[in-house]
C-alpha cells in the first residue's frame, strides 16, 4: 500500500485495505474458478445415533485457490451472492453431486442421500427445478438421494418465491432440510407455512446441552419432541463431544453430524469411511 507521503498512516485502514483487496481478487478469480476446477466438495458424514452407521452426508464446498489456499465458504459464498456467480456455483454443486451419486452406484459403494446447500438467490432464479429434474434423470438417481438444505434465516428474504420453488422440488421427491434451525426469527412459522422433511438443529444449541445450565438441553429436547410429533427427521449439527452424542442418543435423535464423528473430508477420505460404513 502506498503511504502518499503522509505520516498519519493507520493500522486500521491498512487491515481494511488488505481485506477489501482480497475481496477484489477473490471476486475476479471466482469467474474462472469453475473452469479451472478449483472448487471441490468435501463430505461430512451424518451418523445414525443409535448405531454409528453412516446414513447420509452433507456436501460442503471448498475453494482451493492458487494463491490463498483453501478459502472457506463463509468468505466467498456471500461474495458470489453479490456478484451473481452463486448461480454458476450452485449449478456446479448440483451437477457434481448427481454425478458423484451415479459414480458411487456404478462402483458399488453404498448409495446414501447427500444434502447440498442452496442459496435462496438460486432458488429465486428460473430453471432450478428443471436442472435438478434433468440431472436426476440423466444419472437415473432416485430423488430421495438428494436433499436440499436451506438456512432458516434465508427463508425470510423472499418467502413466496423461495417457498414455491421448495415445494416444486419436494414434489419431485427431494427432501428439504431447514438448516441452522432455531437461529432465525420465525422458526415455528416456517414449520407452519410449508412442508419440510428435516430439521437441522444449529450447533449453537448443541454446544451447551451438557452444561450445568439446563436451558439449551431443554430447548434441544423440546425441538426433538416437536420434530417427532410432526413427523420430521432431526439432525443435530456441531456435535463435538462424546457427552453431547450420548445426550442426543438417549433422546432418540435421528442423525448426528459433527467433529466428534468426522470433520468434512475430501472425496477419497470420505469413500474410505463409506466403505467401512460405521463410525463407532
Ligand atoms: P452450514 O451449512 O451450517 O454447514 C455446517 C458448517 O459447520 C460447516 O462449515 C462445517 O464444516 C461446520 N461443522 C461441522 N461439524 C462441526 C463441529 O462439530 N464443530 C464446528 N465448530 N463446526 C462444525 P463450512 O464447511 O466452513 O461451511 C460454512 C457454511 O458455508 C455452511 O454452513 C453453508 O452455509 C455454507 N456453504 C458450504 N457449502 C456451500 C455450498 O455448496 N453452497 C452454499 N450456498 N453454501 C455453502
Ligand atoms: Ca448446511
Ligand atoms: Ca447448519
Ligand atoms: Ca450455518
Image (cartoon, rainbow, N blue to C red):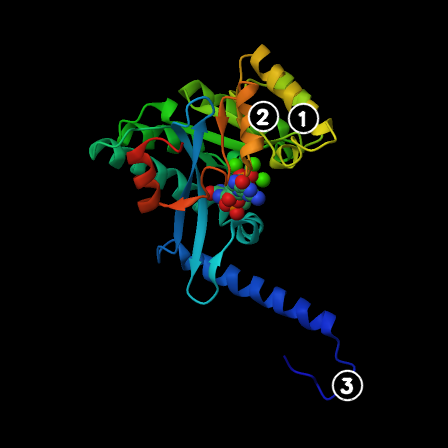
CB contact under 8 Å: marks 2 and 3: no
- Label 3, label 1: how far apart the Cα atoms are: 55 Å
- Label 2, label 3: how far apart the Cα atoms are: 58 Å
Left/right placement of residue 6 relative to residue 160 reads right
CB contact under 8 Å: marks 1 and 2: yes
> Is there any visible trace of residue 40 in the rendered image?
yes
Picture residue at 66% right of the left edge, 19% below the top: 222
For marks 2 and 3, the one nearer the N-term is 3
Residue 120 lies in quadrant: top right
- State which quarter of the image contains the C terminus: top left
Extreme residue in the top direction: 229
Q: Nearer the viewer, residue 66 or 21?
A: 66
For marks 1 and 2, the one nearer the N-term is 1
Picture residue at 45% right of the left edge, 50% below the top: 62
Residue 162 lies in quadrant: top right
Q: Is residue 31 above or below residue 47?
A: below
Q: Which residue is mark 2?
A: 247
- State which quarter of the image contains the N terminus: bottom right
For marks 3 and 1, the one nearer the N-term is 3
Rendered location of residue 156, percent (x, y):
66, 32
Q: Which mark is residue 233?
A: none
Q: Quadrant of ligand 4?
A: top right
Q: Which mark lies nearer to you, 1 or 2?
A: 2
Amino acid at each position: 500500500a502506498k503511504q502518499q507521503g503522509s505520516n498519519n498512516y493507520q493500522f486500521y485502514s491498512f487491515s481494511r485495505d488488505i481485506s477489501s483487496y482480497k475481496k477484489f481478487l477473490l471476486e475476479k478469480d471466482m469467474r474462472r474458478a469453475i473452469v479451472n476446477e478449483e472448487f471441490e466438495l468435501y463430505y461430512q458424514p451424518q451418523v445414525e445415533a443409535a448405531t454409528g452407521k453412516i446414513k447420509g452426508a452433507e456436501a460442503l464446498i471448498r475453494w482451493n485457490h492458487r494463491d490463498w489456499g483453501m478459502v472457506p465458504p463463509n468468505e466467498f459464498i456471500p461474495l458470489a451472492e453479490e456478484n451473481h456467480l452463486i448461480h454458476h456455483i450452485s449449478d456446479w454443486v448440483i451437477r457434481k453431486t448427481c454425478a458423484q451419486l451415479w459414480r458411487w452406484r456404478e462402483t458399488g459403494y453404498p448409495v446414501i442421500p447427500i444434502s447440498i446447500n442452496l442459496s435462496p438467490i438460486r432458488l429465486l432464479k428460473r430453471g432450478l427445478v428443471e436442472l435438478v429434474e434433468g440431472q436426476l434423470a440423466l444419472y437415473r438417481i432416485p430423488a430421495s438421494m438428494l436433499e436440499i438444505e436451506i438456512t432458516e434465516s434465508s427463508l425470510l428474504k423472499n418467502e413466496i418465491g423461495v417457498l414455491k420453488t421448495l415445494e416444486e422440488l419436494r414434489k419431485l421427491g427431494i427432501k428439504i432440510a431447514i438448516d441452522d434451525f432455531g437461529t432465525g426469527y420465525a422458526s415455528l412459522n416456517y414449520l407452519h407455512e410449508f412442508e419440510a422433511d428435516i430439521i437441522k438443529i444449529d450447533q449453537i444449541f448443541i454446544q451447551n446441552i451438557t452444561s450445568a445450565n439446563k436451558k439449551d438441553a431443554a430447548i434441544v429436547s423440546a425441538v426433538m419432541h416437536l420434530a417427532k410429533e410432526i413427523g420430521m427427521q432431526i439432525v443435530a449439527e456441531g456435535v463435538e463431544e462424546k457427552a453431547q452424542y450420548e445426550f442426543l442418543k438417549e433422546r432418540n435423535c435421528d442423525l448426528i453430524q459433527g467433529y466428534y464423528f468426522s470433520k468434512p473430508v475430501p472425496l477419497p477420505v470420505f469413500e474410505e469411511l463409506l466403505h467401512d460404513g460405521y463410525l463407532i
